[in-house]
Image (spheres, grey):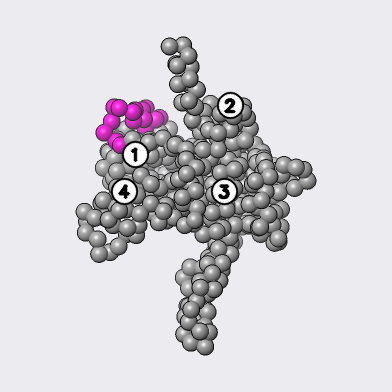
Amino acid sequence: MSWSSNHLPKYRKHRASGQAIVTIRGRDHYLGPHGTKASKVAYDRLISEWLAVGRRSTAPQQDPTSLTVAELILAYWKFVKGHYVKNGKPTSEQPAIRWAVKPLKELYGRTAAVEFGPVALKAVRLKYMQGGLSRGSINQNTGRLVRMFRWAAAEEMIPASVPQALSMIAGLRRGRTEARETAPVQPVDQATVEATLPHLPGVVADMARLQRLTGMRPAEACIVRPFDLDRGGEVWTYQPESHKTEHHGRERTIFIGPQAQEVLLRYLARDPQTYCFRPCDSEAKRLAEKEARRKTPRSCGNVRGSNRKRKPKQKPGERYTTTSYRRAIHRACDKAFPHPQLGYAMKSSFSDDQKAELRKWQPQYRWSPNQLRHTAATEIRREFGLEAAQVILGHSQANVTQVYAERDMAKGLEVARRIG
C-alpha cells in the first residue's frame, strides 16, 4: 500500500521496550521513553530532517562510496523538478540541466560520486567541446554540474570536499581555448524587419511590432492579456503576470505609447484573462483566408475541416512560447531572403553539400525576437540617454543596459572628426 504525499510517519509506542518509535523509509528510530517531552522533541527533529531532504531516508550510507554518479543524478533530478518551477510550470533550466548531465552519465554513470574529481570534470567539459557547444554554453553546463555536486554535499550524500575540489576549475577564457565563440547579439535594422513582416502570420507580425515599439522581452510579448493592462492614462502600462526577475522580488512595468496601443487594440475585445496573441487565432485566420481564396465551388471538393484528423497529435495552443515565436520569425526570414539557387525551404532531395550551403546562408539573414529589444534599446539610449533605456528595459543596473544598448558609432565619428 502506497502512502499519500501528505502522510507523516507516526509517533508510536514499542511495547516490548516501552520506548517511543518512528519508522522512516523502513528504518526504525527509537526516541526514548514513550510519552516524554524528550522523545517528542526527537520525533519532531527526525520528521523535520526527513521533510527537509525531500522525504528521503535520513540514514547515513553504510558505505560512503556506494552512491554512484547515476544515482546522484536521479536524486538531483527529483529536486530539480520541484525547485525550478515558475507559476506551476517548469522553467527553461530543467531541460538545460537534463542536457548538461547526459555526457556526465555516459562517461561516469557507474563511478562512485566521491571519486568524481577535477580531472573527470575536465573530461566531461571536453565532451561538451567535441559536441560543438560554444565557450559560454560549456561554462554554463560545467557550472550546473558543480552546482549538482554542491547540492548533494548539502544533503549529506557526499563529502563537502568533492564540490570544493570541483569548484577549483576555472571557466574557459576567451582566446585560450579551442571552443568556438558566439557573436554578440546585435540590433536588427528596420529595413530587414519590414521585409520580413509580410511573410509572418498576422498575429506574430503584430507581436514583433509591439516588441519593437516597447522594448519588452520576447516572453513578455507572448503573455500579454487585457487583464494586465492599465489603460487609464495617455500612456498605458503593462505589468506581465510573470517576468524574468520576479524571483528577485522586482516588479516589471512596461510603457505602451500610442503606436503600440494601435497594435494592441485589435486584440482587446476578449476575455480579460485570455492571452492576446494566440496560435489558435492565427491558425483560424489562416484557414479563413485560405477558404476565401478558394476557387473550387462549394458543391465540389472537400468541405472545410472534413479532411482533418479528429484527434490530431498537436493542436494550436492558447499562447505562443519564445521558441514558437522565434521559429515563426526564422521561417519568415527564409521566405523573405531565399537562397539564390536553393530557395528558402530545406528539401529532402538536396545533397549534403547543398544542405550545408543552405545552413551557411540562412543564419546570415535570420534575426530573432531578442534583437528587436536590442534595437529599441539602442534607439532609446541615442535619443533619451542611458537612464531612460534602463527604465524602459526594466534593468536594475545600468551596466546590464550597456549590453543591450549598443554605443552610437555616429557620435564617436563626429567627435573624432571635430578634434582631428
Compare marks 1 and 3 and give the one earlier in the sequence.
1
Q: Camera-side residue: 345 or 116?
A: 345
As measured in the structure, the alpha-carbon distance from the residue carrying label 3 to the one carrying label 2 is: 23 Å
- Tell me which amino acid carries mark 1: Ser
Compare marks 4 and 3 and give the one earlier in the sequence.
3
Instruction: Determine which of the numbered discs, if any, sits on residue 209 in the image.
Output: 3
SS state under label 3: helix
For the question of whether residue 66 can be seen, the reply is no
SS state under label 2: helix
Q: Camera-side residue: 368 or 58?
A: 368
Q: Position of residue 218 (x, y in %)?
A: 54, 47
Residue hosting label 4 = 361
Q: Nearer the viewer, mark 1 or mark 3?
A: 3
Residue found 45% across the figure and 21% down from its top: 413
Compare marks 4 and 2 and give the one earlier in the sequence.
4
- Tell me which amino acid carries mark 2: Leu
Extreme-right residue of the structure: 232
- 113 versus 198 height, above or below: above
Region in magenta: 164-180
- 278 versus 147 height, above or below: below
For the question of whether residue 360 can be seen, the reply is yes
As measured in the structure, the alpha-carbon distance from the residue carrying label 4 to the one carrying label 3 is: 26 Å
Q: Position of residue 382 (x, y in %)?
A: 56, 28
Rendered-image quadrant of the N terminus? bottom right
Q: Image check: 173 left or right of 212?
A: left
Q: Nearer the viewer, mark 4 or mark 2?
A: 4
Q: Image check: 40 left or right of 409?
A: right
